[in-house]
Image (cartoon, helix red, strand yellow):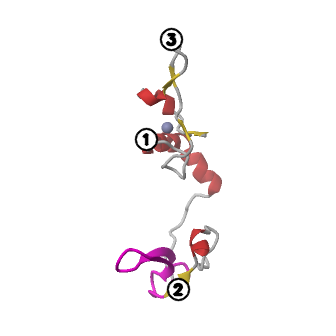
Amino acid sequence: MKFCQGTECHMHKTKDRLKGMKGSKTYQTRRRSDFYYGNGNFCSTWCQEQWFSKFGNRAIDHFGRVTAAKHLTEQNAWSKQIDWDSSYQNRSYIYRNGITKEQRPLTKEQYTDSNYTLNTGE
Ligand SMILES: [Zn+2]
């Protein structure tokens, strides 16, 4: 079980957040085995936005602020995609270049590996 990382999750007065012994219940941060938002860290987009409005600038400065336009080129135009067959029964994983339209097959492992890329340069 993990807690929602929303800085003000407990401020939302919903029935499922009201926990504790009878007579001393408090609204508490949501706790679940997993969440749908923000890579599994937030119970809602509201909590995700609250977190970002408080910490977003610091996070961007920490990981590197974009200070110049990036350019889409043949070298960085590869994107991973799922290709369904006409019956939508079978899927395959492909890498497609957004400029040359070239396609290359991917294994499922390569598709899910966030470090695997054909892109060279930003
Ligand atoms: Zn939350």
User: Residue at 53% across / 27% down in the picture?
Assistant: 28
Seen from the viewer's position, the closer of residues 25 and 58 is 25
Query: Is residue 122 at all visible to an observer of this figure?
Result: no
Name the side, left or right, on which 45 lies relative to 51: left
Q: Is residue 115 above or below residue 58?
A: below
Q: Is residue 63 magenta?
A: no
Label 1 beta carbon within 8 A of ligand 1:
yes
The residue most toward the left is 86
Name the residue tied to disc 1: 46
Q: Earlier in the sequence, mark 1 or mark 3?
A: 3
Q: Quadrant of the N terminus?
A: top right
Marks 3, 2: nearer the viewer: 3
Does 121 sit left or right of 86 as displayed?
A: right
Q: Residue 27, relative to residue 36: is it above or below? A: above
Magenta span covers which residues?
Answer: 74-102
Which residue is label 3 attached to? 23
Classify 26 as above or below 9: above
Element type at mark 3 = loop
The type of residue carrying mark 1 is: Trp
Query: Residue 34, position in %: x, y?
Result: 54, 46
Classify mark 1: residues with Cα within 10 Å, few (<14), some (14-19) or many (20+): some
Of the two numbered discs 1 and 3 in the rendering, the one whose residue sits closer to the viewer? 3
Q: CA distance from mark 2 to mark 1?
A: 38 Å
Residue type beneath disc 2: Arg
Query: Mark 1 or mark 2, which is nearer the start of the sequence?
Result: 1
Quarter of the rendering containing residue 67: bottom right
Residue labelled with disc 2: 104
Residue for point 62% across, 69% down: 113
Q: Residue at x 51, y 46 (%)?
A: 35
